[in-house]
Image (spheres, rainbow, N blue to C red):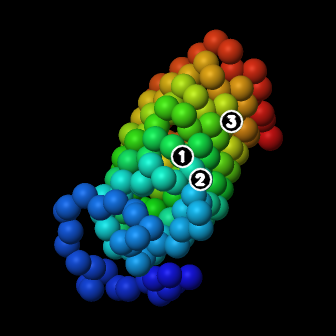
C-alpha cells in the first residue's frame, strides 16, 4: 500500500491549511486503481476527492486522525463500508448529487462529524452508517429507498430527523 500503515505521532503532524486534491498522478499517500480510491494515508486536513473517482473503497480513510473536512467529487457513486470510520477530527463532509450508496459504518465513530447532508440521489444508507457521530439534524431525501438498521445509533447530538415521503424500508434490528 502506498504511504504505509504507520501512523505518526501527533507531535510530528505538520500544519497545513491549504486545500488538497487526491489526484492519482500527484498523491503518493493514496492508492488508486482505475476509478476506485483504494487507500489514503496522508496528513492533509482538507480533502477534495477528484471527479475521476467513481467509488471510495471500504476502509479507504479508516482511522485517519488528520482529516477535518472532505468534499466528495461529483462522479462518486458509492462510498464503501467503514470508508471514514474512526476519523475522529472529521467535522464536515460534502457529498454530491449522483451519489447512490452510503455503506455500512461509513462515518461511524467520527464523533466530531456534525455536518453531512444526504444527497437526493442516495438510494441506500448502510447499517450503522452514522453511528456515534455528532450529527445534529438529518433530512432523509425521498430518493432513499432503504435505511438500514441502527444508522444513527448513539448519535447523542441528533435533535431532528426528517424522513421524506418515498422512503420504502426502514430496517430495525
In this rendering, the answer to whether 120 lies above or below 35 is: above
Q: Is residue 64 left or right of residue 34?
A: left
Contact (Cβ within 8 Å) of mark 2 with mark 1: yes
Could you tell me if residue 88 is visible in this image? Answer: yes
Image coordinates of residue 92 in percent, x first then y, are 37, 47
Q: Which quadrant is home to the C terminus?
A: top right
Classify 158 as above or below 153.
Answer: above
Q: Earlier in the sequence, mark 2 or mark 1?
A: 2
Do the numbered discs 1 and 3 sit on residues whose CB atoms are within 8 Å?
no
Which quarter shows the N terminus? bottom right
- Residue nearest the viewer, comparing 70 with 96: 96
Q: Is residue 132 left or right of residue 49?
A: right
Image: 1 above or below 134: below
- On screen, residue 34 above or below 49: below
User: Given this view, does label 1 or label 3 mark the residue nearer the observer?
Assistant: 1
What residue is disc 1 on? 76
Pointer 2: residues within 10 angstroms few (<14), some, or many (20+)? Answer: many
> What whole-number distance in Å separates the C-alpha atoms at marks 3 and 2?
15 Å
Residue drawn at (42%, 54%) of the image: 50
Q: Residue at x 34, y 60 (%)?
A: 21
Residue 134 location (% of width, % of height): 43, 45
Q: Report the Cα–Cα distance between label 2 and label 1.
A: 5 Å
Helix, strand or loop at disc 3?
strand
As drawn, is 71 to the left or to the right of 122? left
> Is residue 131 in sight in this rendering?
no
Depth check, front residue: 143 or 76: 76
The residue singled out by tag 3 in the image is 124
Which residue is the site of mark 2? Answer: 55
* Helix, strand or loop under label 1: loop
Residue depicted at 26% across the width and 84% down the height? 11
Which residue extends farthest top? 165
Tally the numbered discs.
3
Amino acid at each position: 500500500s502506498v504511504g504505509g500503515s504507520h501512523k505518526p505521532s501527533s507531535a510530528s503532524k505538520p500544519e497545513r491549511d491549504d486545500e488538497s486534491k487526491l489526484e492519482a498522478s500527484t498523491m503518493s499517500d493514496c492508492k488508486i486503481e482505475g476509478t476506485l480510491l483504494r487507500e489514503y494515508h496522508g496528513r492533509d486536513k482538507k480533502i477534495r476527492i477528484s471527479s475521476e473517482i467513481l467509488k471510495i473503497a471500504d476502509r479507504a480513510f479508516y482511522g485517519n486522525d488528520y482529516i477535518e473536512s472532505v468534499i466528495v467529487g461529483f462522479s462518486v457513486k458509492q462510498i464503501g463500508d467503514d470508508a471514514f470510520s474512526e476519523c475522529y477530527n472529521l467535522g464536515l463532509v460534502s457529498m454530491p448529487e449522483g451519489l447512490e450508496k452510503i455503506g455500512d459504518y461509513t462515518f461511524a465513530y467520527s464523533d466530531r462529524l456534525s455536518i453531512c447532508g444526504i444527497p437526493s440521489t442516495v438510494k441506500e444508507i448502510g447499517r450503522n452508517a452514522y453511528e456515534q457521530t455528532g450529527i445534529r439534524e438529518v433530512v432523509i431525501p425521498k430518493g432513499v429507498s432503504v435505511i438500514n438498521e441502527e444508522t444513527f445509533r448513539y448519535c447523542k447530538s441528533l435533535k431532528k430527523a426528517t424522513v421524506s415521503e418515498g422512503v420504502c424500508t426502514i430496517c430495525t434490528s
